Image (cartoon, rainbow, N blue to C red):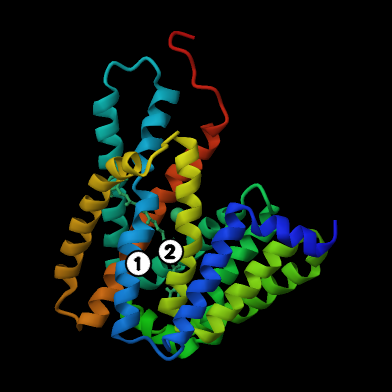
C-alpha cells in the first residue's frame, strides 16, 4: 500500500479524525493569537476545556470499579457498599497526593510528569510498541519544556516548585532521545503516528503551553478514551453517558472549587493554574491505577458465581 493510501485509511479511523480535530484547534488558536505567552484567555480556555471536555473521561472510573468488583468478588452480597468503598479509596488516594504536593512539590511534580508520560502513551495502545508509546508520552510533555521554556518556567513556579531549571535541563536530552527513537523507526511506525508527532511539534513550538495542552488533552486524549469507555461499557446514547458521568463530574467540580478557595490567597492566575494542574495530578494516580486494573480484566470473561 502506498503511503498516501495508508494515510487516507489512517485518517478515517477514530485517531485520524481526532488528529484532524487537534489540527483544527491548533490553527484556530494560532488565528486567535494564542502563540504569545499565556493570558486571561488561555487560562479561561484551559479551565473550561479541562472541566467540560477533559474531566469527563475520568468520570467513568467508577464503572470500571464496579466491573473489578464483579470480576474479583462475583459472590459478594454487598456490591453497592463495595463500590462506595472503592470511590472512597479513590478520593482518599487523591487527597493523599494533594498532601504530598503540599510538602514535597518538586518530588510530586517529577512523579506527575513521569506518570503522565506513561498515561499519555496509552493513546497508542494496540497500535505502537511500548517504547514508541513511551516516546509519545515524553514528547507530549517534554516539547513545551524545550521550546517554550520561559512560559513553562512561570507555570512550574506557579505550581509551588521554586526552581524549575532542573526540569527544563532534563527535558532537552529526553526529548532528543524520544525524537531520535521515533525517527529511526520511521518506516515501521506508520504515517499517521509521524503526522501526529509533527502536529505535537507544531503545537508546542507555536502555541503557549496552556493552549497546547488544551489542544492535545481535550481534542485527542480525552475523546479517544471516552470512545473506548463507551465501547467497553456498552454505553450507546449521549444521554446515558451524561447520566453516568454527570454526578461524578459535579462532585469533582465541587472538590476543585474547594481547592481553588483554599489556594485563593494566591494571585488568581496562580490559584487557577494550581487548581487545574495539581488537581489533575491528584486524579492521575487513581485514574491510571483503575485504567491499568481495568485493562487487565478487559478481555477476560466475567467469572461465573460459585466457580
Ligand atoms: C471516579 C471518582 C471520582 C472522579 C474522578 C475523576 C473525574 C477523574 C478524572 C481524571 C482525570 C481527568 C485525569 C487526568 C489526567 C491528566 C493528566 C495526566 C495531565 C497531565 C498534564 C501535564 C503533565 C502537564 C504538563 C505541563 C506542565 C506541568 C507545564 C506546562 C507544560 C505542560 C502543559 C506540558 C471522584 C474523585 C469524584 C470520587 C471517587 C470516584
Ligand atoms: Fe486519561
The residue positioned 61% from the left and 50% from the top of the image is 125
Query: Which residue in the protein does label 2 denote?
Result: 218
Horizontal and vertical percent for residue 83?
29, 32
Q: Secondary structure at mark 2?
A: helix
Q: Could you tell me which quadrant the N terminus lies in? A: bottom right
Question: In this picture, is 84 found above or below 261?
Answer: above
Q: Residue sitting at 21 percent across and 51 percent down?
A: 251
Callout 1 environment at 10 Å: few (<14), some (14 to 19), or many (20+)?
some
Any part of residue 170 in sight:
no
Query: Foreground: 15 or 178?
Result: 15
Question: How much space separates mark 1 and mark 2, taking CA atoms?
Answer: 6 Å
**Left or right: where 169 falls relative to 107:** right
Relative vertical location of residue 79 with respect to residue 153 in this rendering, above or below:
above
Q: Are marks 1 and 2 in contact (CB under 8 Å)?
A: yes
Quadrant of ligand 2: it is bottom left
Label ID, residue 49? 1
Question: Left or right of 260: which side holds 286?
Answer: right
Residue 201, image quadrant: bottom right
Residue 5: percent from the left, percent from the top? 79, 59
Instruction: Pick whichever of labels 1 and 2 is earlier in the sequence.
Output: 1
Q: Residue 128: where, in percent of width, then height?
A: 69, 54
Asked if the residue at label 1 sits under 8 Å from ligand 1, the reply is no
Amino acid at each position: 500500500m502506498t503511503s498516501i493510501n495508508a494515510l487516507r485509511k489512517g485518517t478515517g479511523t477514530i485517531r485520524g479524525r481526532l488528529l484532524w480535530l487537534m489540527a483544527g484547534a491548533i490553527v484556530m488558536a494560532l488565528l486567535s493569537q494564542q502563540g504569545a505567552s499565556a493570558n486571561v484567555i488561555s487560562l479561561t480556555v484551559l479551565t473550561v476545556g479541562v472541566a467540560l471536555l477533559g474531566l469527563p473521561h475520568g468520570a467513568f472510573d467508577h464503572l470500571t470499579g464496579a466491573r473489578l468488583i464483579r470480576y474479583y468478588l462475583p459472590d459478594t452480597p454487598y456490591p453497592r457498599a463495595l463500590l462506595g468503598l472503592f470511590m472512597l479509596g479513590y478520593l482518599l488516594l487523591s487527597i493523599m497526593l494533594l498532601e504530598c504536593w503540599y510538602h514535597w512539590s518538586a518530588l510530586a511534580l517529577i512523579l506527575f510528569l513521569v506518570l503522565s508520560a506513561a498515561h499519555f502513551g496509552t493513546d497508542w495502545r494496540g497500535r505502537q510498541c511500548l517504547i514508541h508509546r513511551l516516546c509519545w508520552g515524553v514528547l507530549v510533555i517534554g516539547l513545551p519544556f524545550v521550546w517554550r521554556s520561559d512560559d513553562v518556567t512561570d507555570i512550574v513556579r506557579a505550581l509551588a516548585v521554586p526552581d524549575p531549571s532542573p526540569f527544563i535541563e532534563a527535558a532537552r536530552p529526553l526529548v532528543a532521545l524520544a525524537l531520535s527513537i521515533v525517527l529511526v523507526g520511521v518506516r515501521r511506525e506508520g504515517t499517521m503516528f509521524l503526522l501526529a508527532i509533527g502536529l505535537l511539534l507544531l503545537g508546542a513550538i507555536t502555541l503557549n503551553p496552556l493552549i497546547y495542552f488544551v489542544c492535545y488533552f481535550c481534542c485527542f486524549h480525552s475523546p479517544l478514551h471516552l470512545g473506548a469507555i463507551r465501547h467497553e461499557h456498552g454505553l450507546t446514547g449521549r444521554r446515558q453517558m451524561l447520566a453516568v458521568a454527570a454526578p461524578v463530574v459535579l462532585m469533582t467540580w465541587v472538590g476543585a472549587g474547594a481547592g481553588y478557595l483554599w489556594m485563593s490567597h494566591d494571585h488568581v492566575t496562580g490559584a487557577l493554574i494550581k487548581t487545574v494542574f495539581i488537581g489533575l495530578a491528584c486524579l492521575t494516580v487513581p485514574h491510571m491505577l483503575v485504567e491499568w486494573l481495568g485493562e487487565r480484566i478487559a478481555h477476560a470473561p466475567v467469572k461465573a458465581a460459585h466457580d
